[in-house]
Image (cartoon, rainbow, N blue to C red):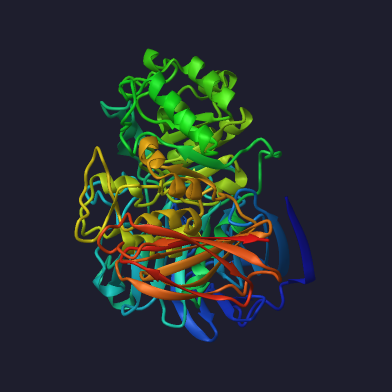
Amino acid sequence: MVKKLFFIATLLYIGATVSAENYLVTSPDGKIVAELNTNKYLSLQFKYNGSILLQESSIGVTLNDGMDMGKNPKVASHKLSNHKETIHAPFYRQQNFETAYQELNLKLKNGFGIILRAYDEGVAYRFYTQRKGKTIILNETAAYQFGKDKKAWLPYTTTPEKPFAMAFQNIYHETRLDTAKQDLAFLPATIDCGKAKVTILESDLEKYPGMWLKANSSEQDKEKGILRAAFAPYPKEMAYYPWRHMSHVKSTCDYIATSTGKRNYPWRIFAITEHDTQMPTSNLVYALAAPNKIGDTSWIKPGKVAWDWWNDWNLKGVDFKAGINFDTYKYYIDFAHNHGLEYIILDEGWYNSKEGSILKPIDDIQLPKLIEYGKSKGVDIVLWAVFNVMDENLETICKTYADMGIKGFKVDFMDRDDQTAIEMVERLAACTAKHHLILDLHGIYKPHGLNRTYPNILNYESVFGMEECRWTEAKNDMPLYDVTFPYIRMMAGQVDFTPGAMRNGTRDNWKAIYTKPISMGTRCHQAACYIVQDSPFTMLADTPTNYKADEPYTRYIASLPVVFDKTIVPQGEIRKYIVTARKKGNDWYVGGQSNWDERTLTLKFDFLADGDYEAIVLKDGINANHDAEDYKIEKYDIHQNSEMKIHLASGGGFVIKVIKK
């Protein structure tokens, strides 16, 4: 539901220009001014508080018929208008939020146009076409010029030899633009422009490939500090890997996108933040996405999951052989029931994934019987699947399992973001919504607002998450990453980081163990993930027997909500630490994490309403620097004028439940 209020008379042909070729939009607070130039070539620049953040940067679209819509653009008309919106946001970081912007609609004589908006939170533009018939786009051009000395955080492809085929999981590399690698980087990416940081994102990515960025494509780009856009080509031929029946691109066309008739193209977003604490709560991606297409969302249930794969089905002290079988999952269901968890997931192995036989569950799990047992305990079941395996028989799969009582799918291994991949995900979102099935998307590109359009999409991976602990190297510093990605990646949307490790390592004693994984950092660092991260469908990733060995801790994290009414970040600094506070009803939940540097923070509670509260504090124990599993739970009485000092161990964290009396 979106309510719009249009104010100030729409200005047609007047008021939007500073010259015949230059058009301006200004944010409601007056701090951001974006300028579109149509002299010789379409270009964009913008300022924040008078300081140039993005220098004049060429943008445009080239077609297979030879037309370059950005070259010598001729303006047919322009219109300037001001808008306010109230956006309802189920299962997002808050239930509702307000936004306002000034918009320029510049219609060109070549059948294309551009919409440019200035929000208090940043700048966004999108192209559109009014052409009839088929449009084939060879390339979309964007040469974003920031200056060579600017610092950036870029997540590079992990497969440079085939850069567009990867899982969108990598750490952020901090670099000056003129010394950045020439490898492609996926979004979001952040540039420190001095007066403010600029994060590049996209939204409403419908039937169009995702944007990537490349630094130093030429000596000129290096001198100017240009990040140049790149896009996956349109697939020509697909093939299958011999494992998981997973499809991949075998050959490509010489264009990136194709469509028929009038359409809008994706939003290109520059989120502008003067303070790091503004970054994790940016709403531009969600605000610019297409509104809800599925209507009623009352059937969608967020929640926590007793998950199997990360802990490798490692149960101990039981009288059955643990594995992918009925007795094991019955045990997971019992654990979920006894700790108030809403779901279990049957990850890879419940069907023969090599054959792709998703409609034939293996006999050992006795799936119908397992579903009925889950129902008797109030625990629902979500099934793992491969994207193309579902897509190849989508309606039958959704109807079959919805009729059986399955509540959703964790869909995995997309590993690309060309146009056909984007289209596949929307097909899955629409069909699962039709059958009242939720989605958790893994092995996928970053969020682009599709969870607004299809709110049954409860989570996305696209993060260097806990699975990496099974095989990564210590140089891939996860505590550092954990206080970096909330500032950058979470600007795009929610994240399925899959936290909850009960085996925790210090900087000195952590090591990768595939079958009995250990997290980097303290146990309280893991607990804080449930508050710091936007994650309405989240895992308890360790084995039930490990959780049952520490009931006070387990019941603490199991009691934390996953959806909230309001989210703020009272303090933090990218790459150092973060403190997040979330409101649910009359109560608040505060979580904090540090990199490998231990630190003492002073917390203020001025966000509380009047009244008395009980603070139940889960924090690093005095010996957590030596044994990362050491923690302590304490209780205090506090109010809005209270202050609390809290010490975070190396790689540490804390959670505070602030309960209104």
In x, y percent, where is residue 231? 38, 52
Q: Residue at x 26, y 40 (%)?
A: 516
Q: How many labels were placed on the picture?
A: 0
Quarter placement of the C terminus: bottom right
Image position of 550 (left or right of 395): left
The residue at the far bottom in this view is 50
* Quarter of the view holding residue 188: bottom left
Image position of 273 (left or right of 607): left
In x, y percent, where is residue 442? 41, 41
Q: Residue at x 21, y 43 (%)?
A: 513
Q: Is residue 550 above or below residue 100?
A: above
Q: Residue at x 63, y 72 (%)?
A: 639
* Residue 348 visible in the snapshot: yes
In x, y percent, where is residue 321? 30, 21
* Residue 145 visible in the snapshot: no
Q: Nearer the viewer, residue 165 or 390?
A: 390
Q: Is residue 305 above or below residue 567?
A: above
Image position of 137 (left or right of 294): left
In x, y percent, where is residue 333? 48, 29
Q: Residue at x 63, y 57 (%)?
A: 94
Image position of 417 (left or right of 425): left
Q: Nearer the viewer, residue 468 or 460?
A: 468
The residue at the far top in this view is 363
Q: Is residue 513 above or below residue 196?
A: above
